[in-house]
Image: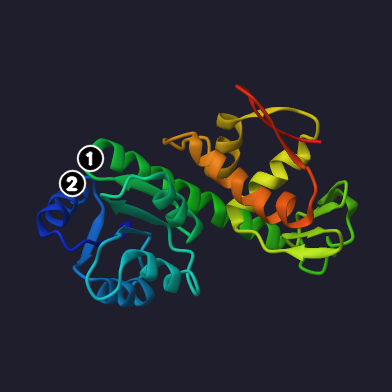
C-alpha cells in the first residue's frame, strides 16, 4: 500500500519540485494551492502526512493546522520562509510535528518525512497495545503517575497540572518539559537534553527553543503563583528544586 502525502503550497514551482522528488521516492502525492482546499482534502482524504506552507491564500497554514487538529492527528510538517524561534514555537504548539524553513535541502525534507511517518507508525502501535491491555484499568489512582514538587502536582495519566490546588493549563510541549524537569528534581538538565525529550531525539533546530518554553512555564507557574520552582544554572541548563 502506497504512502499518500498531501502538499499544500501556493508556490507552484516549489510544489512541483517537491512532488517530483516524493514521487521518485515512491510516495503517492496530491497537491492543493490554498488553505481552504488543503484543509478539505486533509479531512476527507486518506493521507499519511501533510506538508503545509504557512503563507497561504484563503486560510493561512496556522489556521489550517488549528482546524485540522480538532479532528485529526495527521502528521504535519510546516514549510515556511519564516525562521524565527517564535514562529517555530507557534507552529509546534499549534500541533505541527516538525518545521522546515525555506530554502531547504530536499534530502533534509525527505529525512524529516521518514522520521514523522515512523513516529506516527510507532504511536499507532503503542496505542493498539495499550488498548489491548484492558480499558477498565484505573490508572488515575496509581501514585506512579503523580509527580509532586512543593505545591506543584503533575498527573501523567490525565495530563493535569495543579499549583496550590488550582489547575494550570499547559500546551503539550510545556507539559512534557515540566514532566521531564519534575522527574529529575534537583538534577540540572541541559538545554539539549530538555529539547530532545520534548521535541524528539532527531530534532534539528535552535536550542533556544528550550528557553522559550521555560519562559512560558515560569509565567504560568512561578510568576502566577509567586513561587520559585524553575532555576537557571548559568552555562549549563535548568533544574527544578
- Identify the residue position indicated by label 2 in the image: 21
Left or right of 171 on screen, residue 44? left
Q: Position of residue 6 (x, y in %)?
A: 28, 62
Residue under the point 71% across and 27% down: 188
Q: Is residue 137 above or below residue 142?
A: below
- Identify the residue position indicated by label 1 in the image: 106
Report the mark closest to the observer, 2 or 1. Answer: 1
Distance between the Cα atoms at labels 2 and 1?
Answer: 8 Å
* Residue at the top extreme, as displayed: 235
**Is residue 117 something one can see in this rendering?**
no
Q: Position of residue 106 (x, y in %)?
A: 22, 40
Between residues 57 and 235, which one lies in front from this camera angle?
235
Labelled pair 2, 1 in contact (Cβ < 8 Å): yes
Residue 138 in which image quadrant: bottom right
Position of the C terminus, as image quadrant, is top right
Residue under the point 47% across and 61% down: 94
Between residues 121 and 222, which one lies in front from this camera angle?
222
Q: Is residue 40 above or below residue 150?
A: below
Position of the N terminus, as image quadrant, is bottom left
Q: Is residue 205 above or below residue 171?
A: above
Comes first in the chain, label 2 or label 1: 2
Residue under the point 43% across and 71% down: 68
Query: Label 1: few (<14), some or many (≥20) within 10 Å?
Result: few
Residue under the point 57% across and 54% down: 125
Q: Position of residue 119 (x, y in %)?
A: 49, 48
Between residues 234 and 33, which one lies in front from this camera angle?
234
- Give the label on residue 118, or none: none
Q: Secondary structure at mark 1?
A: helix
Residue 62 in which image quadrant: bottom left
Amino acid at each position: 500500500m502506497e504512502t499518500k502525502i498531501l502538499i499544500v503550497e501556493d508556490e507552484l514551482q516549489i510544489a512541483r519540485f517537491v512532488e517530483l522528488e516524493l514521487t521518485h521516492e515512491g510516495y503517492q502525492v496530491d497537491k492543493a494551492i490554498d488553505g481552504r482546499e488543503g484543509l478539505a482534502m486533509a479531512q476527507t482524504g486518506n493521507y499519511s502526512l501533510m506538508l503545509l506552507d504557512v503563507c497561504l491564500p484563503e486560510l493561512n497554514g496556522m489556521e489550517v493546522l488549528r482546524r485540522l487538529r480538532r479532528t485529526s492527528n495527521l502528521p504535519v510538517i510546516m514549510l515556511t520562509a519564516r525562521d524565527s524561534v517564535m514562529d517555530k514555537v507557534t507552529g509546534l504548539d499549534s500541533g505541527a510535528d516538525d518545521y522546515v524553513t525555506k530554502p531547504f535541502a530536499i534530502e533534509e525534507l525527505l529525512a524529516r518525512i521518514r522520521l514523522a511517518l515512523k513516529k506516527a507508525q510507532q504511536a499507532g502501535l503503542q496505542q493498539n497495545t495499550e488498548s489491548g491491555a484492558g480499558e477498565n484499568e484505573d490508572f488515575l489512582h496509581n501514585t506512579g503517575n503523580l509527580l509532586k514538587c512543593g505545591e506543584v502536582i503533575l498527573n501523567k495519566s490525565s495530563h493535569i497540572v495543579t499549583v496550590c490546588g488550582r489547575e494550570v493549563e499547559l500546551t503539550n510541549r510545556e507539559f512534557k518539559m515540566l514532566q521531564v524537569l519534575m522527574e529529575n528534581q534537583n538534577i540540572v538538565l541541559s538545554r539539549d537534553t530538555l529539547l530532545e525529550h520534548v521535541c524528539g531525539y532527531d530534532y534539528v533546530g535552535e536550542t533556544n527553543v528550550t528557553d522559550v518554553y521555560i519562559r512560558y512555564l515560569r509565567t504560568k507557574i512561578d510568576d502566577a503563583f509567586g513561587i520559585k520552582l524553575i532555576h537557571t544554572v548559568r552555562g549549563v541548563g535548568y533544574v527544578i528544586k
